[in-house]
Image (cartoon, rainbow, N blue to C red):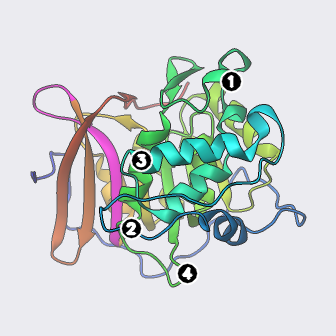
């Protein structure tokens, strides 16, 4: 189902030709002792087989149960199995979901639910999206232009939340710029991500509706909050050939996922399945 973008939207957008690397106010320092994201994905993607004749992805290799309890890799492997059974089929996304320990991004009282397919509260009226929705949106995002290594380039995330999706994105992109409007969540994400030492993740505190022009253009933009329209700033900051995935309020008042592709022929918008996200708001607090 396709429909035109709701206003405000400026169809004549000039996109800078060069991807100049900007300076960012918050950077997580790299740690030379951490394996590269490429290697980690390659190691974990091994169990993901090509699509079988019946169209179902299968993960057949037994994962060594490193760690104990929720730290065990087997726990994450079971979550990945469930995602594949639900129809998620991008091997890189499944691998990235298996790499990130979701229980480290939720409150202690909720850790036993960390790998269930459910959203969980993270404070300040916000939630961490359920794994299926995270994987689905990332799979849609990767339907856009990829670089020679099969990764997305520079990506802007609107709504850092607890930092979980930014961590998953770090394994699928060359760089992640994630902006959060709530100071409490911005600080929580910094703390959650600090020990992971992800050199390609940059956390920003600011109004997500304005995007982050200093880092534009972005190969992809993903949002974790939905409004009545796609903000003009997001479209302007999306590179030509780039893709945007976000929830948006439809005419009925419900939310649906929307995929926006920016092409030389114009901006194309496709509405997909119904979803439920927190509302998109402007300003900071």
Q: Which residue is mark 1?
A: 111
Q: Which residue does the image show at 39% across and 49% down from the upper left?
A: 136
Describe the element under mark 3 as helix, strand or loop: helix
Label 4 – label 3 distance at C-alpha: 27 Å
Front position among marks 4 and 2 = 2
Counting from the top left corner in percent of width and height, residue 113 is at: 60, 23
Residue 98 location, x and y as percent? Answer: 62, 51
Instruction: Give the SS element for disc 2.
Output: loop
Give the image quarter of residue 31: bottom right
The chief SS type of the magenta part is strand
Is 249 on the left or on the right of 213, as rendered? left
Residue under numbered circle 4: 149
Task: Find out whether residue 253 is within the magenta segment.
Answer: yes
Q: Position of residue 74 (x, y in %)?
A: 70, 45
Callouts 4 and 3 close, C-beta under 8 Å: no
Mark 4 residue element: loop
Q: Please give left or right for residue 53 compared with residue 156 in the image.
A: left
Provide the residue span drawn in magenta. Answer: 241-254
**Residue 51 badge:** 2
Instruction: Return the residue at label 3.
Output: 85
Where residue 38 sits, quadrant-wise, is bottom right
Nearer to us: label 1 or label 3: 3
Q: Nearer the viewer, mark 1 or mark 4?
A: 1
Whether residue 78 is visible to the viewer of this picture, yes or no, is yes
Total marks placed: 4
Q: Can the viewer see residue 101 in this picture? A: no
Q: Counting residues from the N terminus, which is met first, the one under dot 4 or under dot 2?
A: 2
């Amino acid at each position: 189902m396709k429909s035109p973008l709701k206003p405000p939207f400026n169809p004549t957008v000039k996109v800078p030709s060069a991807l100049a690397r900007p300076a960012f106010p918050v950077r997580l320092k790299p740690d030379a002792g951490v394996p590269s994201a490429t290697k980690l994905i390659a190691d974990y993607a091994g169990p993901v087989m090509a699509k079988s004749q019946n169209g179902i992805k299968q993960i057949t290799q037994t994962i060594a149960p490193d760690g104990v309890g929720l730290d065990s890799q087997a726990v994450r492997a079971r979550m990945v199995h469930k995602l594949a059974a639900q129809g998620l089929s991008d091997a890189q996304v499944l691998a990235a979901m298996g790499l990130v320990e979701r229980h480290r991004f939720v409150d202690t009282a909720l850790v036993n639910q960390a790998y269930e397919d459910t959203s969980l509260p993270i404070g300040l009226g916000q939630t961490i999206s359920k794994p299926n929705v995270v994987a689905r949106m990332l799979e849609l995002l990767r339907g856009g232009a990829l670089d020679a290594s099969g990764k997305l380039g520079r990506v802007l995330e609107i709504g850092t939340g607890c930092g979980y999706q930014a961590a998953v994105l770090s394994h699928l992109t060359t760089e992640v710029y994630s902006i959060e409007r709530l100071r409490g969540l911005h600080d929580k994400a910094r703390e959650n991500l600090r020990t992971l030492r992800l050199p390609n993740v940059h956390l920003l505190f600011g109004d997500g509706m304005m995007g982050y022009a200093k880092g534009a253009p972005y190969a992809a933009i993903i949002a974790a909050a939905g409004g009545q329209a796609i903000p003009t700033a997001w479209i302007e900051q999306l590179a030509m050939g780039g893709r945007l995935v976000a929830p948006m309020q439809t005419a009925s008042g419900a939310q649906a996922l929307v995929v926006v592709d920016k092409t030389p022929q114009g901006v194309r918008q496709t509405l997909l399945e119904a979803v439920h996200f927190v509302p998109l708001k402007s300003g900071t607090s």
